[in-house]
Amino acid sequence: MLGSAGVPFEAVAAALDENTAKAELRNEALSSADLAAALAEQKALSLPSSPVTLVLGSDQTLETADGTMLNKPGSPAAAFEQLRSMSGRTHRLHSAAAVAENGAIVWKAIETASLTMRPLSDQFLAEYLVHEYEAVRWSVGGYHIEGRGAQLFERIEGSHFAILGMPLLPLLAYLRQRGILLA
């Protein structure tokens, strides 16, 4: 996303055990949106930053209509069950980003998108996962809206970039404000 938007960056894996961090934060009974924001901040703070090196962390959570948070599916069977549970229902994706400078968070944003899946047959889901599981196995909810994943939905409300995993437009505004990108 950043590269496509013309933002210079270097991708570096966060020095954070995401599963442990997520488990600890869930013990704090955070909302799904607050969990995404806290994980983004922890990722941004997990790497060294300085006045000339900003660190961006981002994360995304999925919340079903009943408030349940879903994780990345660990198997095709788990992906099938997640998608089946969302079939015909609306869920929300919370995408958060945070920027660290000199070891402190200097900017953060969160955006939420609502996605309504059409009713999905077991046959469709099985066929979808035969073709898409390897591409979606690391995605919360077990889908991408790109490609075949578009067929899962009947309505989408919110930022396309938030659905992809980052509140990009607010980030670009911040980078322009800082003079990193031209205004």
Image (cartoon, rainbow, N blue to C red):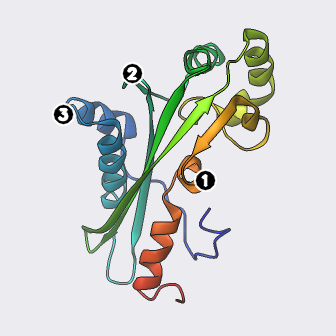
Q: Residue at x 40, y 77 (%)?
A: 53
Q: Quadrant of residue 105?
A: bottom left
Judging by the rendered image, the residue that carries numbered circle 1 is 160
Q: Badges 3 and 1: C-beta atoms under 8 Å apart?
A: no
| Residue in the picture at 78% in, 41% down | 147
Q: Position of residue 107 (x, y in %)?
A: 32, 68
Circle nearer the viewer, 3 or 1:
1
- Relative to 174, is 96 above or below? above
> Considering only order in the chain, which callout, 1 or 2, is on the residue closer to the N terminus?
2
Q: Nearer the viewer, mark 3 or mark 2?
A: 2
Amino acid identity at mark 3: Glu
Name the residue tied to disc 3: 28
Instruction: Report x, y in % for residue 165.
Output: 53, 50
Q: Nearer the viewer, residue 44 or 113?
A: 113
Q: Are marks 3 and 2 in contact (CB under 8 Å)?
A: no
Tag 2 residue: 66
Q: Point out the image quarter for the N terminus.
A: bottom right
Q: Which structural element holds mark 2?
A: loop
Q: Residues within 10 Å of mark 1 (few under 14, many from 20)?
A: some
Q: Residue at x 46, y 76 (%)?
A: 173
Q: Position of residue 137 (x, y in %)?
A: 62, 31
- Closer to the chain start, of discs 3 and 2, is 3
